[in-house]
Image (tube, grey):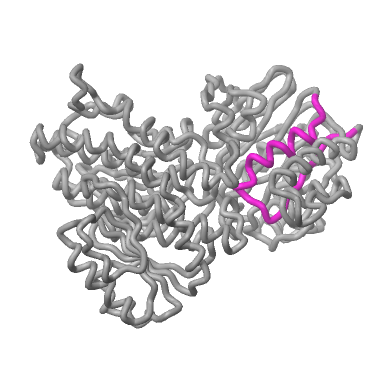
Amino acid sequence: MCGIVGYVGSKNATPVLVKALKKLEYRGYDSAGIAVFEGEDIVVKKVKGSLRTLVEDTTKQIVRLNDNMSDSECDARESELIEKMGDFVWGQLGIGHTRWATHGEPSDVNAHPHTDVSGSIAIVHNGIIENYAKLKAWLQEQGVVFRSETDTEVIAHLIHYFYAESGNLFEAVLNALHRLEGSYALGVISRDFPDRIIAARKESPLIVGLGKGENFIASDVPAVLEHTRDVYFLDQKQIAVLYADHVDLFDEDGNKVLKEPYHVDWDISAAEKDGYSHFMLKEIYEQPRALRETLRPRLVQAENGEFTDIEFAEISKDKNVWKNARRIVITACGTAYHAGVVAQYAFEKFARLPVVVDVASEFRYRNPILNKDDIFIVISQSGETADTLAALRLAKSFGVHVIAITNCVGSTVSREADDVIYTWAGPEIAVASTKAYTTQLGCLYLLALKSAMERETISCEEYKRLLKELNSVPEKIEIVLKDKSSIQKFVSRNFNKEKVFFIGRQFDNATSLECALKLKEVSYMHSEAFAAGELKHGPIALMDSSTLVVATATSSALYEKLASNILEVKTRGAATLVITQDKSGAFLRASDEIIQIPECEEAFEPMISIVPSQLFAYYCAVQRGNDPDKPRNLAKSVTVE
């Protein structure tokens, strides 16, 4: 949700903090702020609005001087002003924050950092303190006057209370943490200790970047890549004390712990736009590479070039796990949930295993039926999604074997699951997931095919054929991406539709769920997905000339039925777009526009057919004047309930 950073070293902290926050803008952007130790005092600068607003407010200069400035010129101007911020706030230690509001509306007062009553302690926080109302009432009884509506301010006053008692800042933070219920990633600085930052995490992600003569905290790796590639992924309830020359780690009881740093091998350009207008567009175009890097290390290839098997080096080799499995349960949220819906069709088709797919936020609050011979799969791009983590822990309490699919090495999901499969998508910066989805599908297809072989539900010849087809998918996505102009032209005529409905059958119905989500996320157009056969059971009442219907059609056995469904909406005035691999002309009468995609094994088409809809969502957002990288009210990683 929110993004936090911290720096201690010999450089001017202000530009370092603000540049790091730029890398985390996708995590929150309704307000921004920094607290820097300047001289003998802590200077706080915070504003409602974007990080650019903070830059302009501090330097008293405007980034966009006129409407004729290009985005690249604005970015260059902003970078120039970020450096100038150091002339206004200069110090060698500080913390920073970009906010996604939970408690308290976006405002200057509710923006982080927050300070205690004396202004001697400043904190930044990502997460939700569930018992803040009780703590706030108690602190008010002690005479504390609150200035904001946030749950975070409680933490600053609580640390101050215990510090006044003991005079020991670390002990005060420890005592405060023991009284907090909920989730937090914290950065704490104090006027009395100008040489250190205290950081802690529970549920919300936090990393420590290890530099030379400088150290960092951040919510995510891209914030520190410019300075270091060696990081600690803090464990649950772990505390770090950062000095310029070293970092000490402690458990929740204050005992020192040792931990091996992780070396990040991403190319720093992976976290930059590289000439693309937006991260979302860049990440759409990165999908062939990301999918190749996810698939190829796991596909076993014989000397004759034939693909013969799937090898998961990172998961259990016990074949009985799959042979004895009675059921698969998949749980996730948002885009990852939609990948799970596609996987349901794949596991049932190939491995003949019954599959239950559930939204994690629902799964965790009912009394689910789980058996020890179930296989439980959780999917989370960040590995920190709060509801998905709760579902994972619930499954573990039943003694069920848990497999996690995630993009983030060292994430909580990856550490707590029995087995973990990484998607190798590289950093995904845009809030709306694209390459995370296709690489999650890649991993799920590999699992489905491997389990099918273990269960002997497909022949060896069919297995090899499917592996060859799966390996060809990245190349076919590249073909789709070369024809973006067709989508752009169609968008120019339809970006102002009041309603957009996505329909399909079987695998295509599952794909439609993600298509509708992408569009509503970034364009703010009303969009929904329906199983095409359900149109007559209600949705057809919504069809009129203000409607666009997008049909995904990749199952040749169902072309005739789907064409009939499309004609039903077309005769009621709706505009129609069909995304299909059909070359027979089955949809010529029914469609206003056809987007042709390459032929492939029908079960794998969701990885290809999603791409035109991703581009459609992106170009609709741009046409409507939205920033597709920062859709309103959304954050990249939902680390709170």
Vertical arrangement, residue 354 with respect to residue 450, above or below: below
| Badge count | 0
Which x, y percent locates residue 452?
Answer: 15, 39
Vertical arrangement, residue 95 with respect to residue 299, above or below: below
Which x, y percent locates residue 555?
Answer: 20, 56
Vertical arrangement, residue 265 with respect to residue 60, above or below: above
Please name the residue shown 56% across and 44% down the image. Answer: 279
193 vs 299, left or right, is right
57 vs 401, left or right, is right
Q: Nearer the viewer, residue 113 or 500?
A: 500
Please name the residue shown 61% across and 41% down the image. Answer: 185
446 part of magenta stretch:
no
Which x, y percent locates residue 431?
Answer: 54, 50
Which x, y percent locates residue 103?
Answer: 65, 59
271 vs 352, left or right, is right
Q: Nearer the viewer, residue 280 or 381?
A: 280
Please name the residue shown 38% across and 69% down the image. Answer: 501
Where residue 39 sits, quadrant-wise, is top right
Q: Which residues are magenta?
A: 11-38
15 part of magenta stretch:
yes
Q: Nearer the viewer, residue 429 or 172?
A: 429
Q: Nearer the viewer, residue 142 or 235?
A: 235
Is residue 251 shown to the viewer in this render? yes
Is residue 157 shown to the viewer in this render? no
